Image (cartoon, helix red, strand yellow):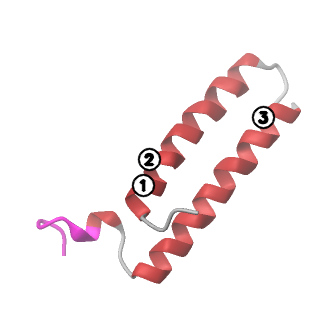
Amino acid sequence: MVDNPETIQECIEKARQRLYQIANSHTELMHPEVIRQSMILDELINEYNKAIRLNGKTPRDKSPGMR
């Protein structure tokens, strides 16, 4: 488990791209591989939301121009 929201965001993006690739390679969205990757993405999103709650900030909140 990764607690850094920025790292989790990177993992989410990779998982999202992988889901897109898998979905495009199968004719059915209910294909087991598509569902499996979708569940992985869901878990990462849940982990990200938990990290945000614990840290109290999104990665964007840390940038100087955002308040």
Q: Mark 3 points at which residue?
A: 34
54 or 65, which is in the foreground? 54
- Image quarter (top left, top right, bottom left or bottom right) of the C terminus: bottom left
Marks 2/1: CA–CA distance = 5 Å
First in residue order: circle 3 vs circle 2: 2
Q: Residue 39, relative to residue 53: is it above or below?
A: above
Judged from the image, the secondary structure of the residue bearing numbered disc 1 is helix
Magenta span main SS = loop
Identify the residue at horizontal 81%, vertical 32% (top origin): 33
**Does the magenta-highlighted stretch encompass residue 63?**
yes
Q: Position of residue 49 (x, y in %)?
A: 54, 70
Marks 1/3: CA–CA distance = 23 Å
Q: Residue 36, relative to residue 5: is it above or below?
A: above
Q: Mark 1 points at which residue?
A: 7
* Residue 30 visible from this viewpoint: no
Q: Where is residue 41 in the image (x, y as percent from the top left)?
A: 65, 49
Q: Mark 2 points at which residue?
A: 10
Span highlighted in magenta in the image: 61-67
Q: Which amino acid does label 1 sit on?
A: Thr
Q: Where is residue 45 in the image (x, y as percent from the top left)?
A: 59, 59
Identify the residue at horizontal 53%, vertical 48% (top origin): 12
Left or right of 45: which side holds 62? left
User: Contact (CB < 8 A) between labels 2 and 1?
Assistant: yes
User: Contact (CB < 8 A) between labels 3 and 2?
Assistant: no
Left or right of 18: which side holds 36? right
- Image quarter (top left, top right, bottom left or bottom right) of the N terminus: bottom right
First in residue order: circle 1 vs circle 3: 1
Left or right of 53: which side holds 57? left
